[in-house]
Image (cartoon, rainbow, N blue to C red):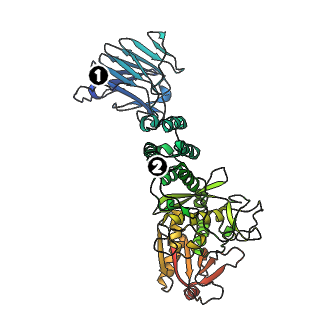
Amino acid sequence: MKTLPAARPRSLQFESLERREVMAAAVTASFNAGVLTVTGTAGNDQINFLQTSNRISVAGIAGSWAAGDVKSIVVNSLAGDDVVSLNSIANGGNQALAEDFTVNAGAGSERVKLADGRYVLFSNQSFRLTTAGVATVNGQAIPVPAPPKPANWFEANVRDAALKSLGASLFNDGIIDRNDAIALFRSAEDGSVVDQTELTDLRAIAANAKLFGTLDYVGKLTSYIVSANAANAKYLGGTLGNLAAGSSAAQLEKLIGKWFLGNDRPVAAGTYKQVAGQLFVNGASYEDIKQGSVGDCYFMASLAETALKNPGIINNMFVVNGDGTYTVKFYNGGQTAYVTVDAYLPTNAYNQVIYAGMGASIANAGNELWTMLAEKAYVQLNEMGWQRAGLPGSGQNSYAAISGGYCYAALGHITGQSTVAFAATSAQANFSVFVTAYNQGKMIEFASKSAPASSAVVGGHAYAVVGYNATAQTITLFNPWGANYARVTMTWAQIQGSFSYFDRTA
Protein backbone atom coordinates (compact mmCIF):
# COMPACT_ATOMS: atom_id res chain seq x y z
CA MET A 1 0.00 0.00 0.00
CA LYS A 2 1.45 3.34 -1.06
CA THR A 3 1.20 6.57 0.86
CA LEU A 4 -1.86 8.50 -0.25
CA PRO A 5 -1.39 11.96 -1.80
CA ALA A 6 -2.17 14.85 0.51
CA ALA A 7 -5.54 16.45 -0.11
CA ARG A 8 -5.54 19.97 -1.57
CA PRO A 9 -6.57 22.70 0.90
CA ARG A 10 -10.28 23.45 0.51
CA SER A 11 -12.76 25.73 2.20
CA LEU A 12 -15.46 24.08 4.33
CA GLN A 13 -19.07 24.59 3.22
CA PHE A 14 -22.30 23.37 4.80
CA GLU A 15 -25.90 23.77 3.60
CA SER A 16 -29.15 22.25 4.83
CA LEU A 17 -31.22 20.21 2.38
CA GLU A 18 -34.19 17.97 2.94
CA ARG A 19 -32.95 14.33 3.10
CA ARG A 20 -29.52 15.50 1.97
CA GLU A 21 -26.35 16.33 3.92
CA VAL A 22 -23.14 18.01 2.76
CA MET A 23 -19.54 17.53 3.98
CA ALA A 24 -16.25 19.32 3.34
CA ALA A 25 -15.55 20.07 -0.34
CA ALA A 26 -19.26 19.60 -1.17
CA VAL A 27 -19.29 15.80 -1.10
CA THR A 28 -23.01 15.06 -0.73
CA ALA A 29 -25.18 12.19 0.41
CA SER A 30 -28.82 11.44 -0.30
CA PHE A 31 -31.14 8.53 0.38
CA ASN A 32 -34.06 7.34 -1.71
CA ALA A 33 -35.92 4.03 -2.10
CA GLY A 34 -33.31 2.04 -0.18
CA VAL A 35 -30.32 3.46 -2.07
CA LEU A 36 -27.77 5.63 -0.27
CA THR A 37 -26.01 7.77 -2.90
CA VAL A 38 -22.83 9.68 -2.19
CA THR A 39 -21.52 12.10 -4.82
CA GLY A 40 -17.97 13.38 -4.77
CA THR A 41 -16.25 16.34 -6.34
CA ALA A 42 -13.76 16.93 -9.11
CA GLY A 43 -11.04 17.06 -6.47
CA ASN A 44 -9.31 14.36 -4.41
CA ASP A 45 -11.98 13.00 -2.04
CA GLN A 46 -11.71 10.72 0.98
CA ILE A 47 -15.08 9.03 1.57
CA ASN A 48 -15.28 6.84 4.68
CA PHE A 49 -18.34 4.74 5.51
CA LEU A 50 -19.08 3.41 8.97
CA GLN A 51 -21.85 1.59 10.76
CA THR A 52 -22.51 2.10 14.46
CA SER A 53 -25.38 0.57 16.43
CA ASN A 54 -27.22 -0.40 13.22
CA ARG A 55 -26.96 3.04 11.63
CA ILE A 56 -24.84 3.87 8.59
CA SER A 57 -23.10 7.19 8.22
CA VAL A 58 -20.43 8.88 6.10
CA ALA A 59 -17.56 10.55 7.93
CA GLY A 60 -17.95 14.30 7.83
CA ILE A 61 -21.61 14.24 6.77
CA ALA A 62 -24.27 15.00 9.35
CA GLY A 63 -27.00 12.43 9.87
CA SER A 64 -27.23 8.67 9.52
CA TRP A 65 -29.47 5.99 8.03
CA ALA A 66 -30.92 2.85 9.56
CA ALA A 67 -28.88 -0.08 8.22
CA GLY A 68 -32.04 -2.13 7.75
CA ASP A 69 -33.39 0.50 5.32
CA VAL A 70 -30.22 0.71 3.19
CA LYS A 71 -30.26 -1.96 0.48
CA SER A 72 -27.34 -0.65 -1.57
CA ILE A 73 -24.79 2.13 -1.57
CA VAL A 74 -23.71 4.01 -4.71
CA VAL A 75 -20.71 6.33 -4.83
CA ASN A 76 -20.34 8.69 -7.78
CA SER A 77 -16.81 9.82 -7.15
CA LEU A 78 -16.39 11.96 -10.29
CA ALA A 79 -12.88 13.15 -11.16
CA GLY A 80 -9.84 13.33 -8.93
CA ASP A 81 -7.70 10.76 -7.12
CA ASP A 82 -10.26 9.43 -4.65
CA VAL A 83 -10.23 6.95 -1.78
CA VAL A 84 -13.45 5.21 -0.78
CA SER A 85 -13.19 3.15 2.42
CA LEU A 86 -15.78 0.47 3.16
CA ASN A 87 -13.82 -0.66 6.23
CA SER A 88 -16.35 0.40 8.86
CA ILE A 89 -14.36 -0.85 11.85
CA ALA A 90 -11.17 0.91 10.78
CA ASN A 91 -13.22 4.05 10.16
CA GLY A 92 -14.47 4.14 13.76
CA GLY A 93 -17.69 2.10 13.52
CA ASN A 94 -18.55 -0.87 15.69
CA GLN A 95 -20.22 -3.01 13.01
CA ALA A 96 -19.22 -4.18 9.54
CA LEU A 97 -21.24 -3.03 6.53
CA ALA A 98 -23.39 -5.59 4.71
CA GLU A 99 -24.73 -3.82 1.60
CA ASP A 100 -24.10 -3.98 -2.16
CA PHE A 101 -21.62 -1.28 -3.17
CA THR A 102 -21.17 0.43 -6.50
CA VAL A 103 -18.45 3.01 -7.13
CA ASN A 104 -18.70 4.94 -10.39
CA ALA A 105 -15.34 6.60 -11.06
CA GLY A 106 -14.48 9.47 -13.31
CA ALA A 107 -11.04 10.52 -14.48
CA GLY A 108 -8.29 9.99 -11.93
CA SER A 109 -7.06 7.12 -9.81
CA GLU A 110 -9.70 5.38 -7.67
CA ARG A 111 -8.88 3.31 -4.59
CA VAL A 112 -11.56 1.33 -2.79
CA LYS A 113 -10.60 -0.08 0.60
CA LEU A 114 -12.55 -3.22 1.45
CA ALA A 115 -13.61 -4.34 4.92
CA ASP A 116 -10.66 -6.73 5.28
CA GLY A 117 -8.09 -4.08 4.44
CA ARG A 118 -7.56 -5.02 0.78
CA TYR A 119 -7.52 -2.32 -1.90
CA VAL A 120 -9.00 -2.32 -5.40
CA LEU A 121 -7.51 0.21 -7.86
CA PHE A 122 -9.24 1.37 -11.09
CA SER A 123 -9.98 4.50 -13.11
CA ASN A 124 -12.93 5.82 -15.16
CA GLN A 125 -14.85 2.59 -14.61
CA SER A 126 -17.67 1.20 -12.47
CA PHE A 127 -16.75 -1.10 -9.58
CA ARG A 128 -19.33 -3.24 -7.78
CA LEU A 129 -19.03 -5.44 -4.72
CA THR A 130 -22.01 -7.66 -3.81
CA THR A 131 -22.95 -8.87 -0.35
CA ALA A 132 -21.70 -12.29 -1.49
CA GLY A 133 -18.22 -10.84 -1.95
CA VAL A 134 -18.24 -10.91 -5.78
CA ALA A 135 -16.27 -7.99 -7.23
CA THR A 136 -16.76 -6.72 -10.79
CA VAL A 137 -15.46 -3.82 -12.89
CA ASN A 138 -17.78 -2.80 -15.72
CA GLY A 139 -19.63 -6.08 -15.19
CA GLN A 140 -16.53 -8.28 -15.51
CA ALA A 141 -15.51 -10.34 -12.45
CA ILE A 142 -12.08 -9.42 -11.12
CA PRO A 143 -9.78 -11.06 -8.57
CA VAL A 144 -9.26 -8.97 -5.48
CA PRO A 145 -5.62 -9.09 -4.38
CA ALA A 146 -4.94 -10.42 -0.90
CA PRO A 147 -3.96 -7.78 1.65
CA PRO A 148 -0.24 -7.51 2.22
CA LYS A 149 0.94 -9.73 5.04
CA PRO A 150 1.87 -7.56 8.01
CA ALA A 151 5.52 -7.63 8.85
CA ASN A 152 6.34 -10.16 11.55
CA TRP A 153 7.97 -8.35 14.47
CA PHE A 154 10.74 -10.92 14.73
CA GLU A 155 11.66 -10.57 11.06
CA ALA A 156 11.94 -6.81 11.43
CA ASN A 157 13.64 -6.56 14.83
CA VAL A 158 15.67 -9.69 15.62
CA ARG A 159 19.20 -10.03 14.23
CA ASP A 160 20.26 -13.53 15.24
CA ALA A 161 19.23 -15.81 12.35
CA ALA A 162 18.08 -18.73 14.49
CA LEU A 163 16.07 -16.54 16.89
CA LYS A 164 14.60 -14.59 13.98
CA SER A 165 13.41 -17.70 12.17
CA LEU A 166 12.08 -19.47 15.26
CA GLY A 167 10.44 -16.34 16.66
CA ALA A 168 8.72 -15.53 13.36
CA SER A 169 7.31 -19.05 13.26
CA LEU A 170 6.17 -19.04 16.90
CA PHE A 171 4.59 -15.62 16.51
CA ASN A 172 2.40 -16.64 13.57
CA ASP A 173 -0.48 -17.02 16.01
CA GLY A 174 0.09 -13.48 17.30
CA ILE A 175 1.34 -14.33 20.78
CA ILE A 176 4.43 -15.65 22.54
CA ASP A 177 3.29 -18.08 25.21
CA ARG A 178 5.23 -19.85 27.95
CA ASN A 179 6.40 -22.73 25.76
CA ASP A 180 7.40 -20.28 23.02
CA ALA A 181 9.50 -18.24 25.46
CA ILE A 182 11.30 -21.33 26.71
CA ALA A 183 11.95 -22.42 23.12
CA LEU A 184 13.45 -19.04 22.26
CA PHE A 185 15.77 -19.18 25.26
CA ARG A 186 16.91 -22.67 24.34
CA SER A 187 17.56 -21.54 20.79
CA ALA A 188 20.00 -19.00 22.24
CA GLU A 189 21.87 -21.85 23.93
CA ASP A 190 23.25 -22.97 20.55
CA GLY A 191 27.01 -23.12 20.55
CA SER A 192 26.91 -23.49 24.34
CA VAL A 193 27.29 -19.71 24.77
CA VAL A 194 24.88 -16.77 24.64
CA ASP A 195 26.57 -14.19 22.43
CA GLN A 196 25.99 -10.43 22.44
CA THR A 197 23.62 -10.49 19.47
CA GLU A 198 21.46 -13.17 21.08
CA LEU A 199 21.42 -11.32 24.39
CA THR A 200 20.40 -8.06 22.69
CA ASP A 201 17.64 -9.87 20.81
CA LEU A 202 16.34 -11.60 23.94
CA ARG A 203 16.22 -8.30 25.80
CA ALA A 204 14.34 -6.69 22.91
CA ILE A 205 11.81 -9.54 23.01
CA ALA A 206 11.34 -9.17 26.76
CA ALA A 207 10.89 -5.41 26.43
CA ASN A 208 8.01 -5.72 23.93
CA ALA A 209 4.96 -6.47 26.09
CA LYS A 210 2.73 -6.70 23.00
CA LEU A 211 4.41 -9.96 22.00
CA PHE A 212 2.96 -11.62 25.10
CA GLY A 213 -0.54 -10.21 24.78
CA THR A 214 -2.56 -11.02 27.89
CA LEU A 215 0.13 -13.41 29.17
CA ASP A 216 1.71 -10.86 31.48
CA TYR A 217 3.41 -13.56 33.52
CA VAL A 218 5.32 -14.85 30.48
CA GLY A 219 6.66 -11.39 29.72
CA LYS A 220 7.64 -10.77 33.33
CA LEU A 221 9.40 -14.13 33.76
CA THR A 222 11.21 -13.55 30.46
CA SER A 223 12.38 -10.16 31.69
CA TYR A 224 13.69 -11.67 34.95
CA ILE A 225 15.93 -13.99 32.94
CA VAL A 226 17.42 -11.38 30.61
CA SER A 227 17.63 -8.43 32.99
CA ALA A 228 19.34 -7.77 36.29
CA ASN A 229 17.38 -9.32 39.14
CA ALA A 230 18.58 -9.78 42.70
CA ALA A 231 17.13 -13.29 42.76
CA ASN A 232 19.46 -14.36 39.94
CA ALA A 233 22.44 -14.29 42.29
CA LYS A 234 21.73 -17.78 43.62
CA TYR A 235 20.38 -21.10 42.41
CA LEU A 236 19.81 -23.98 44.82
CA GLY A 237 22.18 -22.27 47.24
CA GLY A 238 25.01 -21.94 44.70
CA THR A 239 26.20 -18.95 42.69
CA LEU A 240 24.34 -18.19 39.46
CA GLY A 241 24.36 -14.55 38.28
CA ASN A 242 22.52 -12.42 35.72
CA LEU A 243 22.57 -13.38 32.07
CA ALA A 244 25.33 -11.62 30.13
CA ALA A 245 27.10 -11.85 26.81
CA GLY A 246 29.28 -14.93 27.08
CA SER A 247 27.03 -16.68 29.62
CA SER A 248 27.05 -20.43 29.21
CA ALA A 249 24.11 -22.48 28.03
CA ALA A 250 24.21 -24.19 31.42
CA GLN A 251 23.71 -20.86 33.20
CA LEU A 252 20.80 -19.94 30.94
CA GLU A 253 19.24 -23.36 31.53
CA LYS A 254 19.37 -22.78 35.29
CA LEU A 255 17.70 -19.40 34.83
CA ILE A 256 14.96 -21.08 32.79
CA GLY A 257 14.61 -23.66 35.55
CA LYS A 258 14.48 -20.98 38.22
CA TRP A 259 11.78 -18.81 36.65
CA PHE A 260 9.75 -21.06 34.36
CA LEU A 261 10.10 -24.55 35.86
CA GLY A 262 10.16 -23.95 39.62
CA ASN A 263 13.44 -25.81 40.08
CA ASP A 264 15.00 -23.37 42.57
CA ARG A 265 13.30 -24.79 45.66
CA PRO A 266 13.75 -22.91 48.95
CA VAL A 267 16.00 -24.01 51.78
CA ALA A 268 13.75 -25.93 54.15
CA ALA A 269 13.63 -28.37 57.00
CA GLY A 270 12.59 -31.89 56.05
CA THR A 271 12.80 -33.53 52.64
CA TYR A 272 11.23 -32.35 49.39
CA LYS A 273 8.73 -34.85 48.02
CA GLN A 274 5.99 -34.58 45.42
CA VAL A 275 2.58 -34.02 47.00
CA ALA A 276 -0.58 -35.40 45.41
CA GLY A 277 -3.76 -33.35 45.19
CA GLN A 278 -5.38 -30.58 43.21
CA LEU A 279 -5.04 -26.83 43.30
CA PHE A 280 -8.56 -26.13 44.62
CA VAL A 281 -11.22 -28.34 46.19
CA ASN A 282 -14.59 -26.59 46.11
CA GLY A 283 -12.88 -23.23 45.65
CA ALA A 284 -10.69 -21.15 47.94
CA SER A 285 -11.91 -20.75 51.53
CA TYR A 286 -10.35 -19.17 54.60
CA GLU A 287 -10.86 -22.52 56.34
CA ASP A 288 -8.32 -24.06 53.93
CA ILE A 289 -5.58 -22.21 55.83
CA LYS A 290 -3.40 -24.26 58.17
CA GLN A 291 -0.12 -22.67 59.23
CA GLY A 292 2.83 -24.99 59.65
CA SER A 293 6.35 -24.91 61.05
CA VAL A 294 7.30 -21.32 60.21
CA GLY A 295 6.16 -18.09 61.86
CA ASP A 296 4.38 -16.61 58.84
CA CYS A 297 1.00 -16.10 60.52
CA TYR A 298 0.85 -12.59 58.99
CA PHE A 299 0.95 -14.14 55.51
CA MET A 300 -1.35 -17.07 56.24
CA ALA A 301 -3.92 -14.81 57.93
CA SER A 302 -3.73 -12.51 54.87
CA LEU A 303 -4.47 -15.46 52.60
CA ALA A 304 -7.41 -16.37 54.82
CA GLU A 305 -8.82 -12.84 54.80
CA THR A 306 -8.44 -12.58 51.02
CA ALA A 307 -10.09 -15.96 50.45
CA LEU A 308 -13.02 -14.83 52.61
CA LYS A 309 -13.55 -11.35 51.18
CA ASN A 310 -12.46 -11.82 47.56
CA PRO A 311 -11.77 -15.46 46.58
CA GLY A 312 -11.38 -14.37 42.95
CA ILE A 313 -8.04 -12.82 43.87
CA ILE A 314 -6.87 -16.22 45.12
CA ASN A 315 -8.13 -17.96 41.99
CA ASN A 316 -6.31 -15.45 39.80
CA MET A 317 -3.05 -15.84 41.70
CA PHE A 318 -2.32 -19.14 39.98
CA VAL A 319 -1.51 -20.17 36.43
CA VAL A 320 -1.61 -23.94 35.98
CA ASN A 321 1.16 -24.63 33.48
CA GLY A 322 0.18 -28.21 32.74
CA ASP A 323 3.58 -29.72 33.45
CA GLY A 324 3.27 -30.02 37.22
CA THR A 325 4.25 -26.40 37.83
CA TYR A 326 2.28 -23.31 38.84
CA THR A 327 3.12 -19.67 38.25
CA VAL A 328 1.97 -17.54 41.17
CA LYS A 329 1.19 -13.81 41.04
CA PHE A 330 2.04 -11.25 43.71
CA TYR A 331 2.27 -7.46 43.69
CA ASN A 332 5.06 -5.02 44.40
CA GLY A 333 3.62 -1.55 44.89
CA GLY A 334 0.62 -2.55 42.80
CA GLN A 335 2.78 -3.94 39.96
CA THR A 336 2.62 -7.65 39.19
CA ALA A 337 5.47 -10.00 40.06
CA TYR A 338 5.63 -13.75 39.45
CA VAL A 339 7.41 -16.88 40.60
CA THR A 340 6.99 -20.48 39.49
CA VAL A 341 6.76 -23.43 41.88
CA ASP A 342 6.31 -27.17 41.54
CA ALA A 343 4.34 -29.49 43.81
CA TYR A 344 7.44 -30.83 45.59
CA LEU A 345 7.11 -29.70 49.20
CA PRO A 346 9.10 -30.17 52.43
CA THR A 347 7.97 -33.24 54.38
CA ASN A 348 8.79 -35.07 57.60
CA ALA A 349 9.82 -38.70 58.12
CA TYR A 350 6.15 -39.73 58.00
CA ASN A 351 5.66 -38.30 54.48
CA GLN A 352 3.59 -35.43 55.83
CA VAL A 353 3.80 -31.77 54.79
CA ILE A 354 5.49 -29.67 57.47
CA TYR A 355 4.69 -26.09 56.44
CA ALA A 356 1.34 -24.78 55.13
CA GLY A 357 -1.15 -27.64 55.17
CA MET A 358 0.87 -29.23 57.94
CA GLY A 359 0.13 -32.91 58.47
CA ALA A 360 -1.23 -33.59 54.99
CA SER A 361 -0.10 -36.95 53.61
CA ILE A 362 1.79 -36.64 50.34
CA ALA A 363 -0.15 -39.58 48.87
CA ASN A 364 -3.62 -38.15 49.53
CA ALA A 365 -5.22 -37.32 46.18
CA GLY A 366 -7.74 -35.15 48.04
CA ASN A 367 -5.12 -32.62 49.18
CA GLU A 368 -5.90 -28.99 48.37
CA LEU A 369 -2.60 -27.48 47.27
CA TRP A 370 -3.20 -23.77 46.90
CA THR A 371 -2.13 -22.71 50.41
CA MET A 372 1.03 -24.84 50.25
CA LEU A 373 1.98 -23.49 46.81
CA ALA A 374 1.21 -19.87 47.73
CA GLU A 375 3.48 -20.10 50.77
CA LYS A 376 6.30 -21.74 48.82
CA ALA A 377 5.98 -19.06 46.14
CA TYR A 378 6.08 -16.32 48.79
CA VAL A 379 9.33 -17.80 50.09
CA GLN A 380 10.84 -17.76 46.60
CA LEU A 381 9.55 -14.22 46.02
CA ASN A 382 11.62 -13.09 49.01
CA GLU A 383 14.78 -13.67 46.99
CA MET A 384 13.97 -10.59 44.89
CA GLY A 385 14.83 -8.42 47.89
CA TRP A 386 11.87 -6.02 48.07
CA GLN A 387 9.34 -8.20 49.89
CA ARG A 388 10.95 -7.94 53.35
CA ALA A 389 13.17 -4.91 52.86
CA GLY A 390 14.56 -3.91 56.26
CA LEU A 391 13.44 -7.12 57.98
CA PRO A 392 15.54 -10.14 58.96
CA GLY A 393 15.88 -12.73 56.21
CA SER A 394 15.35 -10.28 53.36
CA GLY A 395 16.59 -11.64 50.03
CA GLN A 396 16.86 -15.27 51.18
CA ASN A 397 15.14 -18.18 49.46
CA SER A 398 14.40 -19.97 52.73
CA TYR A 399 11.26 -20.83 54.66
CA ALA A 400 12.89 -19.66 57.87
CA ALA A 401 13.61 -16.27 56.29
CA ILE A 402 9.93 -15.29 56.11
CA SER A 403 9.29 -15.83 59.82
CA GLY A 404 7.79 -12.66 61.30
CA GLY A 405 6.25 -9.87 59.28
CA TYR A 406 3.37 -7.46 58.87
CA CYS A 407 -0.19 -8.16 57.78
CA TYR A 408 -0.53 -4.91 55.82
CA ALA A 409 2.52 -5.78 53.70
CA ALA A 410 1.34 -9.32 52.96
CA LEU A 411 -2.16 -8.06 52.10
CA GLY A 412 -0.63 -5.69 49.58
CA HIS A 413 1.56 -8.41 48.11
CA ILE A 414 -1.43 -10.75 47.69
CA THR A 415 -4.11 -8.32 46.54
CA GLY A 416 -2.24 -5.46 44.87
CA GLN A 417 -4.40 -3.06 46.88
CA SER A 418 -3.29 -0.17 49.05
CA THR A 419 -3.27 -0.98 52.75
CA VAL A 420 -3.45 0.87 56.07
CA ALA A 421 -1.15 -0.25 58.87
CA PHE A 422 -1.11 -0.14 62.66
CA ALA A 423 -4.54 1.20 63.60
CA ALA A 424 -4.38 1.10 67.40
CA THR A 425 -7.08 -0.75 69.34
CA SER A 426 -6.74 1.44 72.42
CA ALA A 427 -8.95 4.32 71.23
CA GLN A 428 -12.72 3.84 71.11
CA ALA A 429 -12.74 6.00 67.98
CA ASN A 430 -10.92 3.22 66.18
CA PHE A 431 -13.86 0.93 66.82
CA SER A 432 -15.84 3.19 64.50
CA VAL A 433 -12.99 2.98 62.00
CA PHE A 434 -13.13 -0.80 62.22
CA VAL A 435 -16.91 -0.96 61.78
CA THR A 436 -16.82 1.37 58.79
CA ALA A 437 -14.04 -0.65 57.15
CA TYR A 438 -15.82 -3.94 57.83
CA ASN A 439 -19.10 -2.68 56.39
CA GLN A 440 -17.22 -1.52 53.29
CA GLY A 441 -15.89 -5.05 52.74
CA LYS A 442 -12.29 -4.22 53.61
CA MET A 443 -9.89 -7.01 54.51
CA ILE A 444 -8.94 -6.64 58.18
CA GLU A 445 -6.48 -8.48 60.45
CA PHE A 446 -5.63 -8.05 64.12
CA ALA A 447 -2.17 -8.46 65.67
CA SER A 448 -2.16 -9.76 69.23
CA LYS A 449 -0.09 -8.48 72.12
CA SER A 450 2.86 -10.52 73.31
CA ALA A 451 0.94 -11.19 76.53
CA PRO A 452 -2.77 -11.09 75.65
CA ALA A 453 -5.35 -10.74 78.41
CA SER A 454 -7.41 -13.62 77.04
CA SER A 455 -6.09 -17.16 77.30
CA ALA A 456 -7.98 -17.91 74.06
CA VAL A 457 -5.60 -15.63 72.12
CA VAL A 458 -2.09 -16.66 71.06
CA GLY A 459 0.49 -13.99 71.83
CA GLY A 460 2.38 -12.23 69.03
CA HIS A 461 0.05 -13.72 66.43
CA ALA A 462 -2.04 -12.52 63.46
CA TYR A 463 -5.77 -13.21 63.19
CA ALA A 464 -8.13 -12.74 60.24
CA VAL A 465 -11.49 -11.05 60.82
CA VAL A 466 -14.23 -13.44 59.70
CA GLY A 467 -17.31 -11.83 61.25
CA TYR A 468 -18.88 -8.86 63.02
CA ASN A 469 -22.18 -8.87 64.90
CA ALA A 470 -23.52 -5.34 64.80
CA THR A 471 -26.20 -6.04 67.40
CA ALA A 472 -23.84 -7.52 69.98
CA GLN A 473 -20.92 -5.43 68.69
CA THR A 474 -18.64 -8.47 68.72
CA ILE A 475 -15.84 -9.38 66.35
CA THR A 476 -15.03 -12.96 65.33
CA LEU A 477 -11.41 -13.82 64.53
CA PHE A 478 -9.81 -16.79 62.80
CA ASN A 479 -6.50 -18.29 63.91
CA PRO A 480 -4.44 -19.26 60.83
CA TRP A 481 -3.27 -22.36 62.69
CA GLY A 482 -6.35 -23.92 61.14
CA ALA A 483 -10.07 -24.53 61.17
CA ASN A 484 -9.67 -27.05 64.01
CA TYR A 485 -8.88 -24.15 66.35
CA ALA A 486 -11.93 -22.38 67.81
CA ARG A 487 -12.87 -18.98 66.43
CA VAL A 488 -12.39 -16.17 68.94
CA THR A 489 -15.33 -13.79 69.43
CA MET A 490 -14.75 -10.60 71.43
CA THR A 491 -16.18 -7.21 72.25
CA TRP A 492 -14.08 -4.16 71.45
CA ALA A 493 -13.11 -3.88 75.11
CA GLN A 494 -11.84 -7.45 75.05
CA ILE A 495 -10.03 -6.76 71.78
CA GLN A 496 -8.25 -3.89 73.50
CA GLY A 497 -6.96 -6.24 76.20
CA SER A 498 -5.47 -8.78 73.81
CA PHE A 499 -4.62 -6.99 70.52
CA SER A 500 -2.28 -4.09 69.77
CA TYR A 501 -3.47 -2.98 66.33
CA PHE A 502 -5.25 -3.95 63.14
CA ASP A 503 -4.19 -3.69 59.51
CA ARG A 504 -6.59 -3.41 56.58
CA THR A 505 -6.97 -2.72 52.91
CA ALA A 506 -7.58 0.96 52.20
Residue 338 in the figure: left or right of residue 284: left
Q: Residue at x 47, y 53 (%)?
A: 243
Q: Is residue 403 above or below residue 41?
A: below
Q: Nearer the viewer, residue 118 or 429?
A: 118
Distance between mark 1 and mark 2 Cα atoms: 58 Å
The picture places residue 333, in percent across and down from the top left corner, at 45, 63
User: Which residue is drawn at the image coordinates 45% and 16% (left, top)?
Assistant: 128
Q: Position of residue 273 (x, y in %)?
A: 71, 62
Label 1: how many Cα within 10 Å (few below 14, some 14–19, many 20+): many
How far across and down, in percent of the image, does residue 493 sit? 56, 87
Location of the N terminus by quadrant is top left
* Residue 284 at least partly seen: no
Q: Residue at x 61, y 66 (%)?
A: 375
Could you tell me the amino acid type at mark 1? Asn
Assign a secondary structure to mark 1: loop
Q: Quadrant of residue 61?
A: top left
Q: N-terminal of the two: label 1 or label 2? A: 1
Between 251 and 315, which is closer to the camera in this rendering? 251
Q: Nearer the viewer, mark 1 or mark 2?
A: 2
Crowding around mark 2 (Cα neighbors within 10 Å: few <14, some 14 to 19, many 20+) is: few
Helix, strand or loop under label 2: loop
Instruction: List the residue tagged with mark 1.
Output: 44
Please name whichever residue, 450 or 41, is drawn nearer the observer in this view of the structure. Answer: 450
Q: Which residue is mark 2?
A: 246
The three-letter amino acid code for the residue at tag 2 is Gly
Percent from the top left, x then y, of residue 337?
51, 58
The answer to whether one can see residue 228 in this image is yes
Q: Horizontally, is 78 left or right of 277 in the view? A: left
**Considering only vertical position in the picture, is 12 above or below 346?**
above
Occupied quadrant, residue 449: bottom right
